[in-house]
Amino acid sequence: MLKNTSRLKSSDMLSRLGGVTFIFAFALVGGYLVSWKMSGQTAAVVAANQNAISAAQKSYELGAMKAHQSILIGRSAQTEAEWNRAAHLWQEAIQLMQEVPPKTPEYTLAQQKIAEYQSHLIYAKDAQLKASAFRLGTNQATEAFTKSQTAKTEADWQAAVSLWQSALKLMQAVPKYSAHYPQARHKISEYEANVRHAQKEVQKAGAFRMAVKAATEASALVQSAKTAGEWNLVANLWGKAIELMKSVPPGNENYITAMEKVWEYQGKLKYAKQKSADLQAASTANKDSDSDFSKIYIPAKVQNEALSKGQVYLEELFSAMADGLDLDDMESPSVIKPGVYMIRYRLNAADGDEKWPETVAVFFDNLANPLGHQVIVP
């Protein structure tokens, strides 16, 4: 019995020792596996970094090579095709530099190269445009000539003007080193003349529209014209409308109507000139007959302000002190009829003596202009 018990204890002890040994062995194996796995990940990261660095270096070197090729082409480029090739290489170089990833040795330098290459690209594109200027200008001129051959309306001729101006601008951009430069200089003079011609045609084509506008303004002013100056302005507008109608070209759709309007406007011009002359003559006569009256009987304020304030102002003015009037002997004007005022005044003589008060009937028009006067003996 005792032997069996001893055997059981020995067996249990061995069992426990075996378990510990197994656990220890498992731990050793697991640690090795973890270490192996971590070592593999580290190697992968290192490999990835090396690949990124290699790719960055390759992209940078290829971009620099493209830039060098473009520089070589640009040193001797003259034609549109050559500058187009140079610009294309600069675009490729920029794209390659942009592909260099951050956190690589080439990244900072690549960013600097991008800015440098972009300035070269702008120059190449500008040179390309200049190299193509003669071809583009010739194309624009052909289109402008075609438009001019069929133009009839004001809008048609305005389009032709724009095309000729565009062609002219392109010819002026042809560089001196271009083989087309001498020919471009000749074309510039030709296109400038074509621009001027087209602009004149715009004016002719738009003459009817501008004539109608001038006639409309004249008709509107006729409704309110009262003075010689206003009727003279009406006459000028009719004269302008006539000249514009005469300039409408025979091929214009409004030509027949324009010729009819010339006769119509000439009659209105004659009437406006006659009205202006009549009013001017009447105004001169009134000034001759009323010059002394205006100086003696009409205060300066009336001459300066009555036109804007009218009869109400005259009533206010003549009831107060004014130059040449004695307030003590001054009476408020009494209205006899529209435009006629009775004024009692005392005029001081040059030697200081006073004249006796007199009553004067002063006649004004609706705009408060003095028309005449009559002294009423007391």
Image (spheres, rainbow, N blue to C red):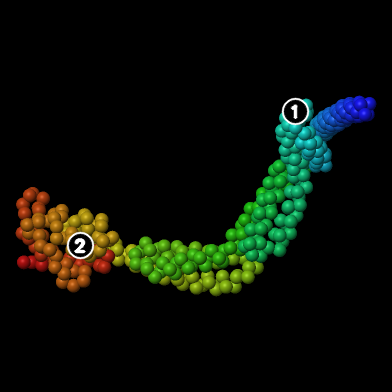
User: In screen coordinates, is 374 left or right of 247?
Assistant: left
Estimate how packed mark 1 is, as few (under 14), some (14 to 19) or many (20 or more) residues with alpha carbons within 10 Å: few
In the image shown, does 202 or 56 lie closer to the viewer? Answer: 56
- Considering only vertical position in the picture, is 61 above or below 334? above
Q: Look at label 2 and name its amino acid.
A: Leu
- Considering only vertical position in the picture, is 48 above or below 160? above
- Extreme residue in the front direction: 1
Residue 314: image tag: 2
User: Mark 2 or mark 1, which is nearer to you?
Assistant: 1
Q: Can residue 108 be seen by looking at this rendering?
A: yes
State which quadrant residue 343 falls in.
bottom left
* Residue at 60% from the left image edge and 70% from the top image edge: 255
In the image shown, does 163 or 237 lie closer to the viewer? Answer: 163
Q: Label 1 near label 2: C-beta < 8 Å? A: no
Residue 109: image tag: 1
Q: Can residue 277 be seen by looking at this rendering?
A: no
